[in-house]
Image (cartoon, grey):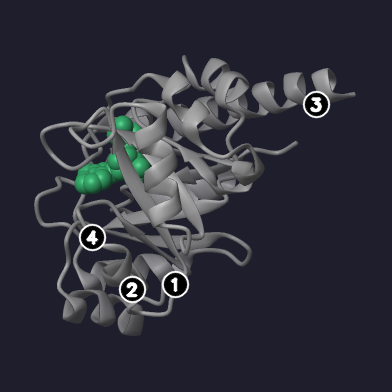
Amino acid sequence: MRTRIKICGLTREDDLLAAADAGADALGMVFYAGSKRCVDVAQAARLRRLAPSFVSVVALFVNPSPDDVQRVLDEVGPDLLQFHGDETPEACERYAHPYLRAFRVGGPTLQTQDDIAQACEQYAGAQGWLFDSYSSGYGGSGLAFDHTLLNGVPATKRRAVVLSGGLKAENVEAAAMHVRPWAVDVSSGVESAPGIKSAGRIQEFVAAVRAADARLTALAG
Ligand SMILES: O=C(O)c1ccccc1N[C@@H]1O[C@H](COP(=O)(O)O)[C@@H](O)[C@H]1O
């Protein structure tokens, strides 16, 4: 049992290296002008080159134009795309590139376990389903949601589940024990200011996830 960890919203070289050194499996960069964590393509390409082998790079978009996504694919070369807006399945799949579909749980169309089950079915082509909380912006709010709604995810699809939304060192162990996701994703919870990560907070977050893994392994054994 090893819950994968994505650290999102990286904007600085030192932060990216701190996340990799702490044991992150994935490093996220935001290409959404409405975010305080938005990076331009040139900076993202520099950051991407620093990512060590066997650590994935994820490019996050909110309702992007196809040209913008293609430019990031060509110039940054992310391993995964993350669509965090209102993109249709067709819009996510047009690049023939693996992607995460983010669902903003608690929003008008995602209120119940059935709503979530339907959303998962609609985006069956996604590499993973990322569950974030609904907020007035599109994400990175630091807000959590009712994790019991994830009982709507088909039981056979645990490997698709990425839990996010308001996670931090203080709550991720309990959240991982309850949801048992494949991966967790965090942005605000490891920051000292928007877009400025704290190496100490990242290390605490990773340690808390590993504590959940140890407890889940003991329970399984
Ligand atoms: O990080 C952002 O600024 C952002 C902007 C727009 C959409 C998504 C964004 N981040 C993602 O939001 C979730 C939750 O973040 P938090 O830990 O609650 O701050 C996470 O998946 C980020 O990748």
Mark 3–mark 4 CB contact (< 8 Å)? no
> Which of the marked residues, 4 or 2, is nearer the chain's N terminus?
2
Image location (x, y in percent) of residue 92: 32, 67
> Is residue 199 toward the left or the right of residue 214 in the image?
left
Which residue type does callout 4 highlight?
Glu
Mark 1 in CB contact with mark 2 (< 8 angstroms): yes
Name the residue tied to disc 4. 87
Nearest to viewer (mark 4 / mark 2): 4
Gap in Å between the C-alphas at discs 4 and 2?
A: 24 Å
| Left or right of residue 145: residue 156 | right
Q: Amino acid at mark 3?
A: Thr
Can residue 192 be spotted in the picture?
yes
Q: Are marks 3 and 2 in contact (CB under 8 Å)?
A: no
Residue denoted by label 2 = 45
Residue 197 visible somewhere in the drawing: no
Q: Residue drawn 67% across and 21% down?
A: 211
Answer whether labels 1 and 3 touch (C-beta < 8 Å). Answer: no
User: Is the C-beta separation of discs 4 and 2 under 8 Å?
Assistant: no
Residue sitting nearer the eye, 17 or 4: 4
Assign the N terminus to one quadrant of the image: top right
The answer to which quarter of the image holds residue 48 is bottom left
Determine whether the residue tagged by mark 4 lies in a helix, strand or loop. loop
Label 1 environment density (alpha carbons within 10 Å; few <14, some 14–19, many ≥20): few
Alpha-carbon span between mark 1 and mark 4: 28 Å
Q: In the rendered image, which residue does mark 1 sit on? A: 49
Q: Amino acid at mark 2?
A: Ala
**Is the residue 66 above or below the residue 176 in the image?**
below
